[in-house]
């Protein structure tokens, strides 16, 4: 028996578009499921070195929730590598001005840290409201368990 390795052209032809409504879903559970679909691990043709995943559209990103007291305690940190330039922002303030950023960052950190991971992140589309410009791709609803 030979091991089947999908070719990039075959994986390109089999791509689907999925839409996920983030309203009321926990951030980590949403991000792990989205990362699995982006990577293609839910398909029988998965290969770690080939992009076999699908496109994912996340709508209502501003309505994602965190459990416990994480909404007040979670901090997003960035540094420009200049002395004294450490910036920290809480989840509550980030969700006000950039509601798509927590989802993008959570999914990014669950993907491989290489060229393939950066390519996969390009297939993630996050929107703060229910409207998105990808209706021509006829995305299907991706059901996630909430419990």
Image (cartoon, rainbow, N blue to C red):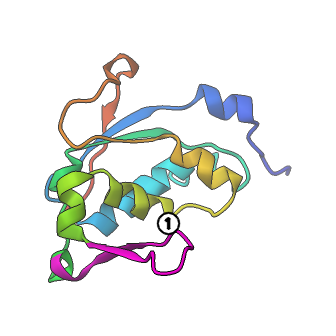
Expressed as whole percent of the image width and height from the top left, the position of residue 145 reads 24, 59
Q: Residue at x 22, y 43 (%)?
A: 128
The foreground one among 135 and 41 is: 135
Q: Is residue 17 magenta?
A: no
Label 1 crowding class (10 Å Cα cut-off): few <14, some 14-19, many 20+? Answer: few
Q: Is residue 83 magenta?
A: yes
Q: What residue is pinned by disc 1?
A: 109
Q: Residue at x 50, y 65 (%)?
A: 110
Specify the farthest residue to the front: 83
Expressed as whole percent of the image width and height from the top left, the position of residue 121 reads 52, 48
Specify the farthest residue to the right: 2
Q: Is residue 142 left or right of residue 123?
A: left
Q: Is residue 40 left or right of residue 25?
A: right
**Is 93 situated above or below 44?**
below
Q: Residue at x 55, y 54 (%)?
A: 41
Instruction: Please report the bounds of the magenta region as a residue range.
Output: 72-89
Expressed as whole percent of the image width and height from the top left, the position of residue 2 reads 85, 49
**Is 21 situated above or below 106?**
above
Q: Is residue 132 left or right of residue 81?
A: left
Q: Residue at x 27, y 78 (%)?
A: 74
* Numbered disc 1: secondary structure: loop
């Amino acid at each position: 028996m030979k091991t089947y390795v999908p070719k990039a052209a075959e994986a390109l032809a089999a791509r689907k578009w999925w839409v996920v409504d983030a309203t009321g879903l926990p951030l980590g559970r949403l991000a792990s499921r989205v990362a699995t679909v982006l990577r293609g691990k839910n398909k029988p043709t998965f290969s770690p070195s080939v992009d076999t995943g699908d496109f994912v559209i996340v709508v209502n990103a501003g309505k994602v929730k965190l459990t416990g007291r994480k909404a007040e305690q979670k901090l997003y940190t960035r540094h420009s590598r200049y002395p004294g330039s450490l910036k920290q922002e809480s989840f509550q303030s980030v969700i006000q001005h950039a509601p798509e950023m927590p989802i993008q960052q959570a999914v990014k950190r669950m993907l491989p840290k290489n060229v393939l991971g950066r390519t996969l992140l390009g297939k993630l589309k996050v929107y703060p409201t229910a409207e998105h410009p990808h209706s021509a791709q006829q995305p299907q609803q991706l059901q996630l368990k909430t419990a």
